[in-house]
Amino acid sequence: MAINGSKMSPWQRGPEMSFVCLADFKAHAREQLAKSSWDFIEGAADEGITCKDNIAAFRRIRLRPRYLRDVSMVDTRTTIQGQEIQAPICISPTAFHSIAWPDGERSTARAAQEANICYVTSTYASCPLEDIVAAAPRGLRWFQLYVQSDWELNKQLIRRAEALGFKALVITVDVPVGAKRRQDIRNQLNLVANLMRMDLRSPEERSSTLPAPTSLPSTSFCWNDLSSIQSITRLPIILKGILTKEDAELAVKHNVQGIIVSNHGGRQLDEVPASIDALTEVVAAVKGRVEVYMDGGVRTGNDVLKALALGAKCIFLGRPILWGLTYKGEHGVREVLNILKAEFHTSMALSGCRSVAEISPDLIRFSRL
């Protein structure tokens, strides 16, 4: 087997790795992080039903491999919004990376650049966008926007991201209000207060004597407001948090360029479908008119294969990136990405797929378990 032209097996490269799967990084992070930090990263809404189901739902899907195919050369590359990436494994927007590693999002960006995949930077990154871009100037980056109540601040954020070379705008739609996260409450972590204190202005604007505008997602943002954002930017707009065919159809109607099927890692409305279960409904609704991606529950190469077989153009990773950061910053994130890519490469070869284009719904069977 070969990874993008290499004849070497992904499991026969260099010295033996100390961690062999994403679960190893999770166990290490739990040991290393303070309880409040761990609870924030792993926290789920209410009873955590959706959070658990994101992972369990993948286990209800079985694979139908095809054999006696030449898999001596397996190519994991694909494209998203016209940009080539080394594998359909990218990084979801998550806030406050400095909780896991002092260099925070700078380390994440460097690892993504090295892996040649996309990193979606959060509105609530723990360091300025300018510093993140300077750390990885050649990386493919999208900017995630929590639409703010202050429209002038929205305009500033979007234009700043565009000027810094971000290639798409990812609008999170599933946080009109924050959910109840029990562990954060027990730990007396007031997320709303922390967000309100964040200064989302550029470094130059922060040096002014004017007070920072209040930073809090809008509770009134709706479909008709998308045209206001489209008038501000020419960047492709991707909606993150779509779970139903009705909203998928509205997204297409409002001329967005992509959808990330997501339930916010089970951190917003509990008891919604697992992302992989909602994926099929959304893919069927858009009928190929826009690209569809997904996040939530991906932990193995087989999970990546299943998501692509069900119509996702690529998957995005959230918590595992923070586990990797906790391990050893940029190098830990790179190891997480390398392990998952190697597993995905093996899954492709073992199922008879030589390229991402050969991954089809025929690979999938839903278990009765």
Image (cartoon, rainbow, N blue to C red):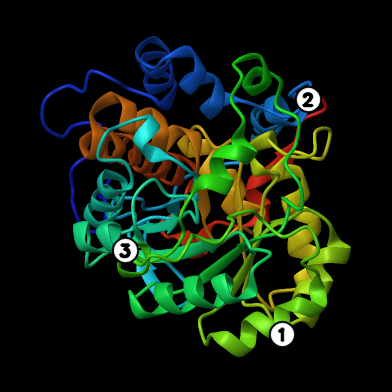
Image vertical order of residue 199 relative to residue 30, above or below: below
Circle on res. 140: none
Specify the quadrant that holds the N terminus: top left
Q: Amino acid at mark 3?
A: Ser
Residue 338 seen: yes
Q: Residue furthest left?
A: 14
Q: Amino acid at mark 1?
A: Ser
Of the residues under marks 3 and 2, which one precedes in the sequence? 2
Q: Position of residue 77 (x, y in %)?
A: 36, 61
Tell me the element at label 3.
loop
Image quadrant assignment for residue 328: top left
Q: Position of residue 167 (x, y in %)?
A: 42, 74
Q: Are marks 3 and 2 in contact (CB under 8 Å)?
A: no
Residue at label 3? 207
Q: Is residue 15 left or right of residue 170?
A: left
Image quadrant assignment for residue 52: top right
Tell me the element at label 2.
loop
Residue at label 1? 227
Circle on res. 46: 2
Between marks 1 and 3, how big is the CA–CA gap? 32 Å
Of the residues under marks 1 and 3, which one precedes in the sequence? 3
Specify the quadrant that holds the C terminus: top right
For the residues carrying marks 3 and 2, which lies nearer the camera in this image? 3
Tell me the element at label 1.
helix
- In depth, the one of 329 and 177 nearer the eye is 177
